[in-house]
Image (cartoon, helix red, strand yellow):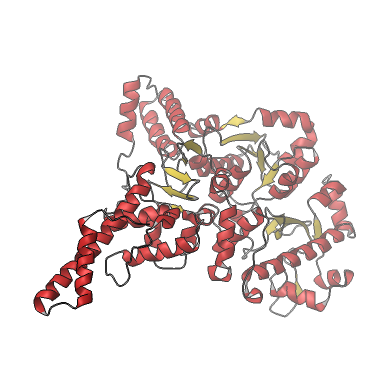
């Protein structure tokens, strides 16, 4: 798959991308020396072990060994495939991808589907104003024309043939819709639209492309709400309804209010609550949490106050625990029973509802309120049960400050106030066995040499020109020479770009290991160490050649040229050789 995109374009794309900005937009980085650090997003990391280097354009974790360049981060954090990650970086940098084999490439197939979705969505929207039943429904829900246009609300008739004739849909366009599963065919050969007799809510990705639809039945059709099926461009657990519209108004909103339904999003937006999104009727996923926190620092869940709403909010909090911090926080609004955001804002208006947002419950309040249900804190047994249940959840919080704060609240609630008792309590109840993720490489001169070059590709420019390693068999030397050749060919490479050039080759795993290796050499000593290692390896090569020639002299004798070579080697080894 990567072979469909020219290497030169990927190299240029990485040179334009600042990995610090890319990662910091998703998780908060803190500068530490010349690098940036944070808790690793890829494992349960209690202390910051995730390091990002601006100089190398490379990230690595000393805890779980996660590592890579900007493309790898998008693949692993945003759960994109290779081409999607290139698309993301290309859009960010305002570039067009020069795909090879355009007709066969899935990228262009996606673009074609986006175009089809846009065309059919416009027809759905036109149909809203031409159909009495949809006009009546929208009027009864109090949705105005501005919201219809802003969210591109549409409607589809029960009979596809009637709809097709109404808008003079061509046979070619219809076949394209069928081919791409936007329309379906019954076993008897009838064409139908799965959203028939439903109000249509187009779902956009963050770039504004329509990737799917949600549908709300007008009559007693079950289920009341449906979504498009999972496709190559639509994955419910990774999408958020209304986020595109929010970002049209504000790229970095103060908060995001998460509600349950499409109508809730639209009505609240109509009442000037502008930062409202919903999760397509699914339980919150970690991918959605990441997307939400990439957009804002405050997520406010607004659910019905019944048992289903409370359980949905609780599930969301548990999923979010590894991602919360001092700056990334959750809040909760639980509405009165039998109320949802759509109904309650119409009853109480903007000001009252906005006060609900301002007074939203903090995550610690909601956490302990929910976890203390049916717990009697006067009972020793209940206290034990409570702490045993709460601690594993609290331990999922990777941020030190927030985790300690939650533990302090827990200690106070079960009556442990003394610091020594508190520490003993934690020690005896926490799982102290930690998986040893430490990354270890046996230190050899050649590995140090290769590691230094991978981490500092500019060292290739100071390699002495008189060194000659041709036809010499030393373990690791071919790898070094391969990297050296690449670094000389591309003199401005950073580590991230260098690794990308070898993504499809078996050798990449060795390169990646050495790219994150802590070789324990001070930065100011790297150049000297690199040259010393080269000279030492060269001297070893000369010594091996010398030993061979001396043994040949004893057996068969040497030619005049071989004798001259022995003399030259002796001269080289008898003094500190100076190189260009």
Q: Nearer the viewer, residue 481 or 20?
A: 481
Residue 259 location, x and y as percent?
67, 43
Residue 539 location, x and y as percent?
24, 60
Residue 60 location, x and y as percent?
43, 49
Identify which residue is drawn at 73% across, 59% down: 221
Quadrant location of residue 5?
Answer: bottom right
Q: Is residue 288 above or below residue 103?
A: above
Quadrant location of residue 216?
Answer: bottom right
Q: Is residue 155 above or below residue 529?
A: below
Identify the image quadrant of the N terminus: bottom right
Identify which residue is drawn at 81% across, 78% down: 171
Identify which residue is drawn at 73% across, 80% down: 189
Identify which residue is drawn at 67% across, 67% down: 110
Give the left or right position of residue 297, taking residue 431 as reference: right
Q: Residue furthest top?
A: 418
Quadrant location of residue 351?
Answer: top right
Q: Residue furthest left?
A: 554
Residue 16 visible to the viewer = yes
Q: Nearer the viewer, residue 569 or 430?
A: 569
Residue 116 location, x and y as percent?
75, 67
Residue 156 visible to the viewer = no
Numbered circles on residues, count: 0
Identify the image quadrant of the C terminus: bottom left
Give the left or right position of residue 258, taking residue 453 as reference: right
Q: Is residue 146 above or below residue 506?
A: above
Give the left or right position of residue 537, taking residue 325 as reference: left
């Amino acid at each position: 798959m990567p072979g469909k995109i020219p290497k030169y374009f990927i190299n240029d794309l990485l040179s334009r991308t600042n990995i610090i900005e890319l990662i910091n937009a998703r998780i908060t980085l803190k500068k530490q020396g010349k690098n940036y650090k944070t808790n690793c997003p890829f494992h349960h990391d209690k202390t910051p072990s995730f390091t990002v280097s601006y100089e190398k354009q490379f990230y690595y974790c000393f805890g779980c060994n996660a590592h890579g360049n900007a493309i790898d981060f998008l693949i692993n954090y945003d759960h994109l495939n290779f081409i999607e990650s290139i698309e993301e970086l290309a859009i960010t940098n305002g570039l067009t991808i020069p795909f090879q084999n355009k007709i066969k490439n899935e990228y262009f197939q996606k673009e074609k589907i986006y175009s089809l979705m846009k065309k059919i969505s416009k027809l759905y929207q036109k149909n809203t104003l031409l159909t009495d039943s949809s006009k009546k429904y929208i009027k009864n829900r109090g949705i105005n024309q501005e919201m219809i246009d802003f969210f591109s609300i549409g409607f589809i008739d029960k009979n596809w043939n009637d709809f097709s004739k109404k808008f003079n849909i061509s046979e070619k366009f219809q076949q394209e819709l069928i081919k791409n599963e936007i329309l379906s065919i019954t076993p008897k050969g009838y064409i139908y639209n799965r959203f028939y007799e439903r109000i249509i809510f187009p779902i956009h990705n963050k770039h504004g492309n329509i990737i799917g639809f949600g549908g709300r039945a007008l009559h007693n059709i079950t289920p009341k709400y449906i979504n498009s099926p999972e496709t190559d461009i639509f994955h419910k657990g990774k999408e958020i309804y209304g986020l595109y519209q929010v970002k049209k108004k504000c790229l970095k909103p103060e908060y995001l209010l998460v509600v349950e339904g499409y109508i809730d999003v639209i009505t609240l937006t109509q009442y000037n609550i502008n930062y409202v999104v919903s999760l397509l009727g699914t339980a919150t996923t970690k991918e959605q949490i990441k997307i939400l926190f990439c957009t804002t620092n405050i997520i406010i869940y607004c659910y019905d106050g019944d048992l289903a709403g409370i359980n949905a909010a609780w599930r969301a909090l548990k999923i979010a625990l590894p991602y919360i911090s001092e700056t990334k926080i959750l809040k909760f609004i639980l509405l009165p029973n039998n109320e949802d955001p759509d109904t309650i804002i119409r009853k109480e208006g903007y000001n009252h509802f906005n006060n609900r947002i301002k007074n939203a419950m903090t995550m610690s309040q909601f956490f302990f309120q929910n976890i203390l249900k049916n717990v009697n804190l006067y009972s020793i047994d209940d206290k034990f049960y409570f702490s045993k249940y709460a601690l594993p959840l609290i331990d999922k919080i990777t941020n030190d400050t927030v985790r300690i704060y939650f533990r302090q609240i827990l200690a106070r609630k079960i009556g442990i106030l003394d610091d020594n008792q508190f520490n003993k309590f934690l020690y005896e109840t926490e799982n102290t066995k930690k998986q040893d993720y430490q990354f270890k490489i046996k230190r050899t001169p050649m590995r140090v040499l290769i590691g230094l070059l991978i981490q500092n590709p500019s060292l290739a420019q100071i390699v002495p020109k008189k060194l000659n390693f041709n036809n010499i068999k030393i373990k690791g030397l071919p790898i070094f020479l391969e990297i050296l050749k690449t670094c000389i060919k591309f003199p401005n490479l950073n580590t991230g770009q260098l690794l990308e050039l070898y993504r499809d080759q078996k050798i990449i795993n060795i390169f990646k290991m050495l790219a994150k290796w802590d070789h324990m050499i001070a930065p100011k000593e790297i150049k000297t160490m690199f040259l010393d290692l080269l000279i030492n390896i060269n001297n070893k090569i000369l010594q091996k050649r010398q030993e061979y020639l001396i043994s040949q002299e004893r057996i068969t004798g040497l030619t005049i040229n071989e004798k001259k070579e022995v003399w030259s080697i002796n001269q080289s080894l008898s003094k500190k050789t100076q190189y260009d």
